[in-house]
Image: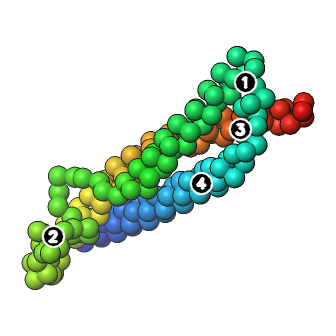
Amino acid sequence: MKNFRRKHKSNYESTNDFLKLAISDLTGNLTLLDTKISIIMATVGVMLGLVVACKSNILKAYYFYEDVCILKALFLFLSATYIVSIIITFVYGIKCIMIRFGKSKSSSLWFFQTEDYDGITEQNYIKRVKYMTDESIMKNLAVEVYKLNKINNRKMRTGKTTIILFAISCAVISALMIMVGISYLVV
């Protein structure tokens, strides 16, 4: 009987440690993804600022290509594509950073609504925490891992889209700047 209790206790400790490490890893991953997306959004802002600063050069290049219908159309297409890709990149970047909530069927004692937001009162919270058993603590940790994984899945999907859109905008602005550079080399 004692061996069973020891096994059960060590299983609880290893499960508890597993859940705590999973929460730590997921939290670190979410923070890293938010940082990457923030860097991408800052880079897009800088690129957009450079384009605005070089607007006279871009306009000169447009006038250079206006006599050749295909090149003019390509120049306008690249410009429009760049503007659209920048806007969509910002939208997805902000969406990715704003994803903060995961839902589960179980109520959490980790992240919860307080009394000011139609949630649990302080006294009820303290009472619930005070009477938690090892099993309820483990269940609460498991619920948090589940919620963090839902957040992680949504952030990863949105972050991947943001990165793809950023790559597209970089490719488009590169092609556009090559056209601007060619117009300066020829003149």
Q: Are marks 3 and 1 in contact (CB under 8 Å)?
A: no
Disc with the residue nearer the chain's start (4 vs 3) = 4
Q: Position of residue 15 (x, y in %)?
A: 34, 62
Disc with the residue nearer the chain's start (4 vs 2) = 4
Separation of residues labelled 3 and 1 (CA atoms): 10 Å
Please name which of the two marks, 4 or 2, marks the residue nearer to the observer: 4
Disc with the residue nearer the chain's start (2 vs 1) = 1
Q: Position of residue 100 (x, y in %)?
A: 35, 58
**Residue at which label 3 appears:** 59
**Residue at which label 4 appears:** 45
Q: Position of residue 96 (x, y in %)?
A: 43, 51
Q: Please state which amino acid type lies under the numbered disc 2.
A: Tyr
Residue 145 visible in the displayed image: no
Element marked by disc 1: loop
Q: Are marks 2 and 1 in contact (CB under 8 Å)?
A: no
Q: Residue at x 37, y 54 (%)?
A: 99
Q: Please state which amino acid type lies under the numbered disc 4.
A: Gly
